[in-house]
Image (tube, rainbow, N blue to C red):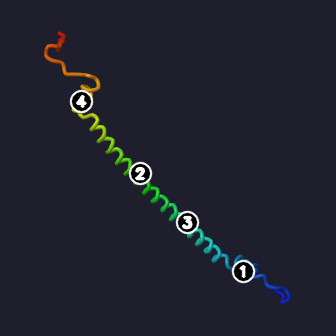
Amino acid sequence: MFSSKQPYNLAKLIAIDLFSVGRLPLALLILIFASAMGVVFTTHHTRQAISDKDLELVDRERLDNEWRNLILEENALAEHSRVQAMAATELDMKRPDGNSEVVISIK
């Protein structure tokens, strides 16, 4: 098969050996490589999803805090004594006395 005058090409000899005698080991090697790549990709996507989830939880917590602050601010601005004081100072409103009240009844 090989003459002593020609130099051996190691890559060619390995390829001939793999495709002639070692078909099953070659197929198993390809399957192992594909499985390893699947594990790597799955691990990467899982870690990315966990990272995204953590960022969303932080954002949710920030929005919850902002919502609580807005509720407190709304309650403070809508307090009855504050509204009554603003009506008296800014709009010059006052409570009518008994003589100024008019009662309308519909029969």
Residues under labels 1 and 4: Cα distance? 95 Å
Q: Earlier in the sequence, mark 3 or mark 1?
A: 1
> Which residue appears at 18% of the width and 18% of the height?
96
Q: Nearer the viewer, mark 2 or mark 1?
A: 2
Q: Earlier in the sequence, mark 4 or mark 2?
A: 2
Camera-side residue: 69 or 26?
Answer: 69
Name the residue tied to disc 2.
59
Say what secondary structure mark 1 lies in. Answer: helix
> Which residue appears at 79% of the width and 84% of the height?
8
Look at label 1 and name its amino acid.
Ile
Q: Is residue 81 visible?
A: yes
Tell whether label 2 touches label 4 (CB within 8 Å): no
Name the residue tied to disc 1.
14
Q: Earlier in the sequence, mark 3 or mark 4?
A: 3
Camera-side residue: 95 or 70?
Answer: 95
Name the residue tied to disc 3.
38
Residues under labels 3 and 4: Cα distance? 69 Å
Answer with the quarter of the image where residue 7 lies: bottom right
Q: Tag 1: Cα neighbours inside 10 Å, few (<14), some, or many (≥20)?
A: few
Q: Tag 4: Cα neighbours inside 10 Å, few (<14), some, or many (≥20)?
A: some
Name the residue tied to disc 4.
85
Q: Is residue 86 above or below residue 38?
A: above
Q: Earlier in the sequence, mark 2 or mark 1?
A: 1
* Horizontal and vertical percent position of residue 6: 84, 86
Look at label 2 and name its amino acid.
Asp
Q: Nearer the viewer, mark 3 or mark 2?
A: 2
Q: Tag 3: Cα neighbours inside 10 Å, few (<14), some, or many (≥20)?
A: few
